Amino acid sequence: MTRSHRAQPAARRGVVFLFSAFLLVAILLIIMYGRTLPTERERTESISVRIGTMNDFLKDLHADVHRATFIAGFRSLIAIEQYSNEHGAYLADPEQSFVEAFMNGTINGTAYEVLNESTFGDYLARVNAEANAIGIVLNISVSNVTLGQSTPWSVDVAFDMAVNVTDTRGLARWDYDRRFATEVSILDLRDPAYSVLTYGKVPNTFRISPYNNTDFVDGNDTTNLHDEIANMYYREDPYAPSFLQRLAGNLTGSSKYGIASLVDLDELSAQGLYAKTYLSDVDYLYFSNTTTTVYCPGKGEPLQSWLKIDQEHYLDAAHDYGLQELNSTVC
């Protein structure tokens, strides 16, 4: 009896110990499980926030690329004209020189101040620094830069961009290729034809004529034609070369994006340049020394005595300068 009574407390203690152990394990599991759930939740939320941040970064990049392209593109065209003006010659490959200026700020290895901190390469470096500041590793490769035209008054700068965006913590990554195209105005740029062929003495900037074809002459009123000549405005002209053709020194070609001005021979003479009074004053014909049938205003008309217009621009009502209203004759 004595031994039986002594065994019962020991058994009870064993049961209590076993129950306590199970309870402790259960509590530990609950604590561990409870901690695991929020950790996974937080990780999911962290990834979601990170993806949102990176997506916003890419949206801003896509929107800003066009602004950066316009700035670098316009300044590259200025640099090309400066080169032509300084060297008195056209570039052998204007598109290749544009790419060099656009990306690196140089033409034939020479840096141009107008492109200081303004190249597309400079822009990419700044974007990369911004990406690093928010924990993004950004790699962008630009290729196949082209220069084209789809309107007379602008050029189209296009390029392929390979983009790799990676989160520094390895939470997200994007890899994609995209082609960007941006329209860059040529207005207020200097015409390389004037720069080269007047030795930089009579520069002329691209400004659209405020006059329509029928507005140059009204009866005997030639005020608008005088103003057109004095300001050497430009207008669309399918017989004339485009801006890109002018950039390459091709003044004998024509384009649906062609533009032309009238050369002010008084201005050339004032700068000590020989005025070729026997040629048409339409700039691409004048500067290319193209001999053709020309028309002069009738005697007594209040216009410059040297003014001459070629037959195409005399007879084509859509692109004439109003000389038919002035009793003009072949001269």
Image (spheres, rainbow, N blue to C red):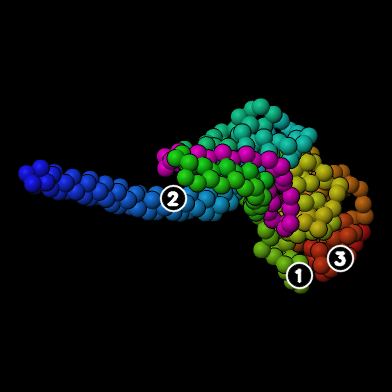
Residue 18 screen position, x and y as percent: 22, 46
Q: Is residue 182 visible?
A: yes
Q: Secondary structure at mark 1?
A: helix
Label 1: how many Cα within 10 Å (few below 14, some 14–19, many 20+): few
User: In the image, what residue occupies the spot 84% across and 56% down?
Assistant: 239
- In the rendering, which numbered label is found on residue 202? none
Q: Write the residue at 56% across / 52% down.
A: 62
Give the SS element for disc 3: loop
Residue 309 image offset from top left, x and y in percent: 84, 57
Kindly report the distance in space between the C-alpha atoms of the residues bearing marks 1 and 2: 66 Å
Marks 3/1: CA–CA distance: 12 Å
Q: Is residue 278 left or right of residue 68?
A: right
Q: Main secondary structure of the magenta part?
A: strand
Task: Using the rendered view, name the quadrant where residue 88 is placed.
Answer: top right
Image mark for residue 47: 2
| Mark 2, other Cα within 10 Å: few <14 / some 14–19 / many ≥20 | some
- The reply to whether the magenta stretch includes residue 218 is no
- Which residues make up the magenta segment? 130-158
The outermost residue toward the bottom is 219
Residue 156 or residue 65, whichever sits in front: 65
Across and down, in percent, residue 318 comes to 82, 67
N-terminal of the pair, mark 2 or mark 3, is 2
* Disc 1 target residue: 214
Which residue was labeled with disc 3?
316
Q: CA distance from mark 2 to mark 3?
A: 67 Å
User: Per the image, is 133 magenta?
Assistant: yes
